Image (cartoon, coloured by chain):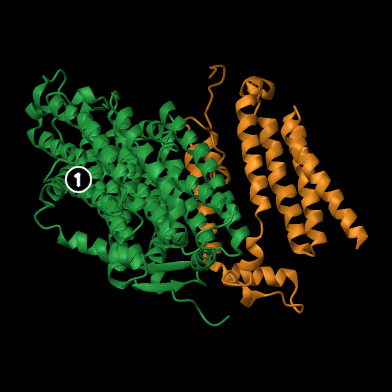
Amino acid sequence: MNGLPNFLPALPEIFLVLTVLGLIVYGAIKGEAESRFIGYIAVLALVVAQVLEMSLSPAHSVTFNGLFQSDRYSIYMKSLVLLGSALSLILSFDFQDHEKSERFEYPIFVLFATIGMMMMISANDLISLYVGLELQSLPLYVLAAMRRDTVKSSEAGLKYFVLGALSSGLLLYGASLLYGFTGTTEFSGLAAAFSESSGHPPLGVIFGLVFLLSGLAFKISAVPFHMWTPDVYEGAPTPVTAFFAAAPKIAAMALLVRVLVGPMGPLTAQWTQIIVFLSLASMILGSFAALNQTNIKRLMAYSSIAHVGFALVGLAAGNVDGVRGVLIYMTIYLFMTIGTFAIILNMRQHNRMVENIDDLAGLSKTHPMMAAAMAIFMFSMAGIPPLAGFFGKLYVFLAAVNAGLYTLAIIGVLTSVVGAFYYIRIIKLMYFDKPHEPIDRKVGRDNAIILTATALFILLFFIYPRPIISAATVASTSLFGGG
Amino acid sequence: MIISALAFYLFATLIVASGVMVIVSRNPVHSVLFLILAFFNGAGLFILLGAEFLAMILVVVYVGAVAVLFLFVVMMLDINFVKLREGFLNYLPVGGLIGLILLIELLMVAGGWAFSAQAVPGPGAPLSALAPDPGVSNTLAIGKLIYTHYFYLFQAAGLVLLVAMIGAITLTLRTRKGVRKQNIAHQVSVNAKDRIELKKVKIRGGV
């Protein structure tokens, strides 16, 4: 009506959409032979989108009639997601060489899912939230079932799809209740309506909030909505699992934080108890259920559930410091996960992928560097100083203690001790047990580079943590309406 | 006035009744047919509201395309629904209890429905710029909303559909070996020489 909207805030998304549409046509004409080229272009596109995001995205902007927003928080989270997608895409190349399972659709689905994640993070309306979420989930279902000739992969895809559809239903139901009780779907309108009823929101709003949170908790796989995670992580092809653990989890966490702090900000007293419960349950189940896992991908699934629990500790604090803790935690989590999966992707014996934890036995004799990197990641996940994982936990627990959530912080520290048991068991296997069947010598070049880079990041984070911490501070204050 | 009220109750009762029948009927084909009936009644409700465009879209898209597709799928997949429902009675107590609790909670929610009346005119009126205009037809109003106000969502939904399409192809298309395809251009451009070989046959010699 009055001219075109401002496209600048959505420039990275638009760029990615145009690239992916071009790649589809190219792939359809050239066929599977050009899969690798399409993969490289996809990585390049993600890098360009990253540059666009960091250089051109405005710090405060709402566009498309209030449906889309860009702020420092979205820039930070989108950068993380783009990085996670690009790294996991690079990790997949080596795997596809070995397994001869190259499909040109793979990078295309990764790109589509990334676009969906960016739209989620930038959502400023319940409808754009939902559409972004679906655009993110749909490619993930297909990716999980990509190796349709194996039963496990098909099962993972189907399970993920059915449960994901259920969670979308819950989320939509919650959104419709919120709309019914406030008359708007826009985040700022919701926030205004909730602050009007400060203190005593009607039951329907609480009801809608609970359903909305259940839907989002499914996406971050917080207990009690975690059931799909181990099966899907185990069944999906390993590079897909790496992607699942890295990018979508961070995007869903970003969305959860955005929804709870933005429109639900006035209802903090109401949602804090839900988040505290989710966090407690995730930490406890994630730590204890991982104890007797034998498959490393299942172990990583439970470990990611526990990590989500730890990150939610920061959110439960419900203030700037807490959200900053979540951001730092998710950043470090991204590097730890990508690094660990780079090692898992190298676990092959006689050119076949192996997934048992016992297969890592004696890794220090055959691959000293890889064992050292794995030890760094495991110690970091367990939260041993001075590795990065310790600082991640430090910031969330500090925020929780300052907000008076002592019980949560204490239980968090205790479960992290339980978690340390299974992380350190892997280190014991690698360094003190005898290898019965050595892992193949060959390590892909891309994997080796990513492995080194992530391990160095985790190892040396404590020397110069300032850039990430200050960026996270800026991002979290912008979420709370400050500078 | 009274006629439209009667029509509303008729459509509403039928929609609920056919909704129940969708779940209860033993034959899946019957379920789909009841679903179609529910769609028709929904279209009737839309007409009562004066939204004739939506009513027609509902009939065309849902009855004409979606439900027929369902019917095909149900008929092609040979699923024994009686067997699927074997455990029904075992799960009934737990499921029924959860359903009952949810129902009670929902009733409590409906009891507290006083909020929306105050909130709607206040902050929550983002569409006030698009208030009903008597000079504009339904179709035009919907077009303005979808293609102008919500064009971002329209494009995004298009992407979701594209992903769904590519996903379906990726998961089902497989290249089989040994399939004989008919290539018409190839057939047309065949020369007589390629197919017929003339041979001199000696008299009394045989081939």
Residue occupying image coordinates x 59% and y 59%: A179
Q: Which residue is mark 1?
A: A389
Q: Residue A200: percent from the left, percent from the top?
A: 54, 58
Between residue A154 and residue A188, name the one nearer to us: A188
Between residue B66 and residue A253, name the one nearer to us: A253
Rendering colour (chain A):
green
Q: Give the answer, above or below, for where B137 lies relative to A202.
A: below
Image quadrant assignment for residue A121: bottom left
Q: Mark 1 falls on what kind of element?
A: helix
Q: Amino acid at mark 1?
A: Gly
Horizontal side of A242 relative to A61 (left or right) equals left
Residue A22 showing in the rendered view:
no
Q: Which chain is represented by orange in the image?
A: B
Q: Give the answer, above or below, for where A300 lies relative to A207.
A: above
Q: Residue A477: percent from the left, percent from the top?
A: 31, 66
Q: Residue A355: percent from the left, percent from the top?
A: 27, 27
Q: Give the answer, above or below, for where B132 lies relative to A215.
A: below
Q: Chain of mark 1?
A: A
Residue A84 showing in the rendered view:
yes
Q: Give the answer, above or below, for where A329 lies relative to B181.
A: below
